[in-house]
Amino acid sequence: MLNFSTAFRCSTAFRCGIALLLAAAFSSVAAADGLQLQDIFEIEFASDPQISPDGETIVYVRNFSDIMTDRQYSNLWSINADGSKHRPLTTGLRNDGEPRWSPDGSRIIFLTKEDTDRQIARAELHCRWMDTGQTARLAAFENAPADLTWTTDGQHIAFSMVVEAQREPFASIPAKPKGADWAPPPKVIRRVNYRYDGMGYLKDGYRQLFVLSAEGGTPRQVTDGEFDHEGPLAWSPDGWLICSSNRSPDWELNPQESDLYRVPVPGISRIAGDGKIARITTRPGPDHSPVFSPSGDRIAWLGYDDRKVGYQISHLYVADTADAMKNSPPKKIDVLGGEFDRSVESPVWAPDGNGLYFNYDDRGHGQLGHINFDSDVREVAKDVGGTSIGRPYQGGSYSASNNGVLAFTWTSPDHPAEVAVVRPFEKAKAEKAKVLTLLNADLLEQRTLGKVEEFWFETSLESHKIQAWLMTPPDFDPKAKDKKYPLILEIHGGPYANYGWRFSAEMQMYAAAGYVVLYVNPRGSTSYGQKFAELIHHNYPGEDYDDLMKAVDVVLERGFVDPDRLFVTGGSGGGVLTAWVVGKTGRFRAAVSAKPVINWYSFALTTDAYPYFWQYWFASYPWEAPADYHKRSPISLVGNVTTPTMLLTGEQDHRTPITQSEEFYQALKLRGIDTALVRIPEASHAIVKRPSNLMNKVAHILKWFEIHED
């Protein structure tokens, strides 16, 4: 099985030949077998669909994997909004992304990194003229830029990029003799934020803003100082660049605090006042994602009043541009949809300037919404997402044209992200979305996927039911006599996140191995409102455990699951709950806790995000309330564990460091409990970033369950 796009991507005849041989071997797998481990290299998905200003053409990122390099890559493709002329704009083993249309629709800019002999080269900014296909490199960078934003006249491009700080050595020693082989010099760390998961130890520098001519040349740095200046960015009607930043002296210790700032750009801004960076908002809490209305008379952005709780809904704010740009704070701020109990993301103004589009999650579904100044939120499209291939997490993105046509990533349990469009409102109702691509048709027509059923059940919560999904094996027969199926309870991470009606390669492979797979959004999950998520504030893990156990009981009542063959697994927050589950009950035959937190005290002082967790997930510093940290730690229950439990974590995980897994592993060893520690070399918290790591994760989980099934 070799699809067109796979052949198009092959950079040499040798690679194409190998791919053909592998495809032939893989195609021997019977369709009834469901999704197989090796299929990971064949799955493709769309992301970041950008529709042209006239609503006619969509440029999107097409993501794929290469079996020879074990890497994920991305090229740019285009497709007309009616589904015609689907064709590649870039090809090869490279990472192309962040396509952005010029205001007049004549060009797109995008970032690219080429893979040369498996070494990723520096990032480059390219521009493509859409009428001729001509492409030019505008600039090259040692550090990758982000937040590409055109000026309204299409003459300049703004972006953010890390600028490394130049510092004198902390201490000096005499120079080594010529030819001497001395140890590497010490690395002195003095900043609060010095490492980040997936990036390792950070370069000493700060994210600054730059402006570049659309014809290329040398970028101009327009911000400085020991602060980060973040996107998304926006240009005001009078040429100021708007960003989000926290420019307070203690900004690194307050990760949820930021305000909007306006930045003067000489030659572009019509400078008023002293021409210095000026603060626009002053609320306690984050302010970000600014967007100006089509006429420029209003500005909208996202944020919330920080209450120091683990999950807080982002609201949509709107102010008159004149007030926002001249006053601090703006004279009048409207909170649109103030009663709308869902977190809002990615605002875009509607063409009439009387409302905005945005995306949000509702009950395990990604949604596109629209709100006017005089009406409630209306649903525009459903099932936005599909960019989280491993497990069915929220995600996805969209863009809007000048005539209101929206392009977005659409998903379902049997489809990773595809490109879809939805047309403008007609009589207060959007027409049905149209899916334009089927990127995995060649693969999925050869596989029988597990079927997914959504269901709800009651727990001890009086005001809420709990939502869950059940995936059954491809050959599932609930009425089969003398046959009971094993069950895997798969717990989502976060814990402020949600599973939903989306594709999941990992769960499909569990189903293909013959398991019924149960996944649940217990209390604390997002997409059900602020109060539901806040039920685990300073109480995690807690009664969310009860929701999970009740879900298992509800499925057992159906009669087709073997109560003696129950298994449990989960990653990150799901790893925490897995370790908590085996400390609370012995009903599961085996467990795999992936990248867990085992001891909240040590975690809070070793995670990369340590300025955040102690003040949002707990009431005080660890040393001030050690008993509180301990009672919520799975290590407190390790003396109860009888379940064979595997720990699985990336060796370069800086979010939930592997020392957490080692702590539980060694405690179980001391107690004589069957356990194993799986270390994934070079992997961060995002274990499955490399395709073979996703295969290894699933293979090791299935093997652990297999050896403990009897």
Image (cartoon, helix red, strand yellow):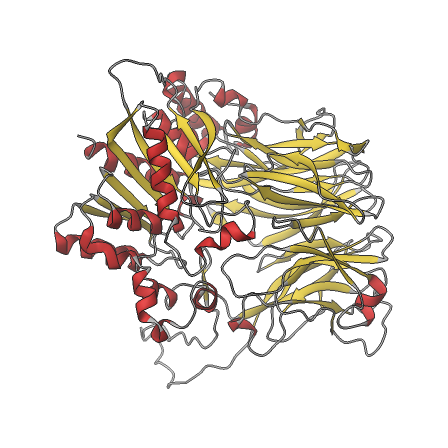
Q: Residue at x 54, y 45 (%)?
A: 528
Q: Nearer the viewer, residue 436 or 625?
A: 625
Tell which of 695 and 460 is nearer to you: 460
Residue occupying the far front of the picture: 462
Q: Is residue 218 visible?
A: no
User: From the viewer's perspective, is residue 279 above or below residue 536?
Assistant: below
Q: What residue do we see at 44% from left, 62% from top?
A: 617
Q: How many marks?
A: 0
In the rendered image, which quarter contains the C terminus? top left
The residue closer to the viewer here, 73 or 321, is 321
User: Residue 556 vs residue 96: left or right?
Assistant: left
Q: In the rendered view, tell whether residue 54 sits above or below residue 218.
A: above
Q: Position of residue 502 (x, y in %)?
A: 51, 34
x, y percent for residue 3? 53, 23
Q: Quadrant of residue 80?
A: top right
Which quarter of the picture shows residue 128?
top right
Q: Residue at x 48, y 64 (%)?
A: 616
| Location of residue 57 (image quadrant) | top right
x and y, in percent, of residue 671 in the image: 13, 54
Give x and y (percent) for residue 459: 41, 41
**Is residue 21 in sight in this rendering?**
yes
Which residue is at a point 71% across and 43% down the rendered structure image? 377
